[in-house]
Image (cartoon, helix red, strand yellow):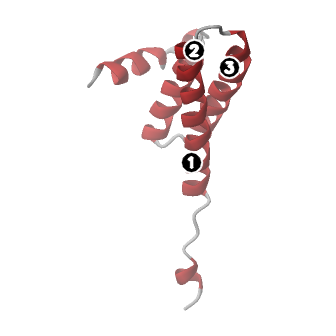
Amino acid sequence: MNSCEFYVSVNMTEKNSNKEPRSAAEWYDLGCLYRKKGEFGDAVNAFRKAVSEAEAQIPLLDDAVLTEQLVSVRDKSEASIELVLRITGFVNKDLMNP
């Protein structure tokens, strides 16, 4: 288990202790863990929360490096939402046309 997986798995207790992630990056990490576990609905919700948190924080930052990191988290979260939706909505049309 790498440090990121450990960090995220520790944060998984938020469901039981009502302790929510505090940043866009933490929401993104939580979404990745849910996606890895196959809990796609929870993953999409966490990624959407990451996007929302990032968009709320970006205008408040003066530091270009931090802004770039937050934009990166937002972009990865949006891409992850699209990926999960593509996976869950996949239909093999060849199997439908015998």
Q: Amino acid at mark 2?
A: Ala
Q: Quadrant of the C terminus?
A: bottom right
| Residue beneath disc 3 | 53
Q: Of the residues tagged 3 and 2, which is closer to the observer?
A: 2
| Residue beneath disc 1 | 84
Q: Residues within 10 Å of mark 2 (few under 14, many from 20)?
A: few
Q: Secondary structure at mark 1?
A: helix
| Residue beneath disc 2 | 64
Q: Secondary structure at mark 2?
A: helix
Tell me if residue 38 can be seen.
yes
What residue is shown at x 71% (from left), y 23% (from top)?
55
Instruction: Name the one closer to the observer, 18 or 97.
Output: 97
Q: Secondary structure at mark 3?
A: helix
Task: Tell me where residue 7 appears, x and y as whole percent.
Answer: 39, 16
Residues under numbered marks 3 and 2 in contact, where contact means CB atoms less than 8 Å apart: no
Q: Residues within 10 Å of mark 3 (few under 14, many from 20)?
A: some
Which badge, 2 or 1, comes first in the chain's sequence?
Answer: 2
Q: Residues within 10 Å of mark 1 (few under 14, many from 20)?
A: some
Asked if residue 4 is positioned above or below residue 43 in the image, the reply reads above
What residue is shown at x 57% (from left), y 43% (from top)?
79
Residues under numbered marks 2 and 1 in contact, where contact means CB atoms less than 8 Å apart: no
Report the Cα–Cα distance between label 1 and label 3: 20 Å
Which badge, 3 or 2, comes first in the chain's sequence?
Answer: 3
Tell me if residue 21 can be seen.
no
Instruction: Name the one closer to the observer, 56 or 21.
Output: 56
What residue is shown at x 58% (from left), y 78% (from top)?
93
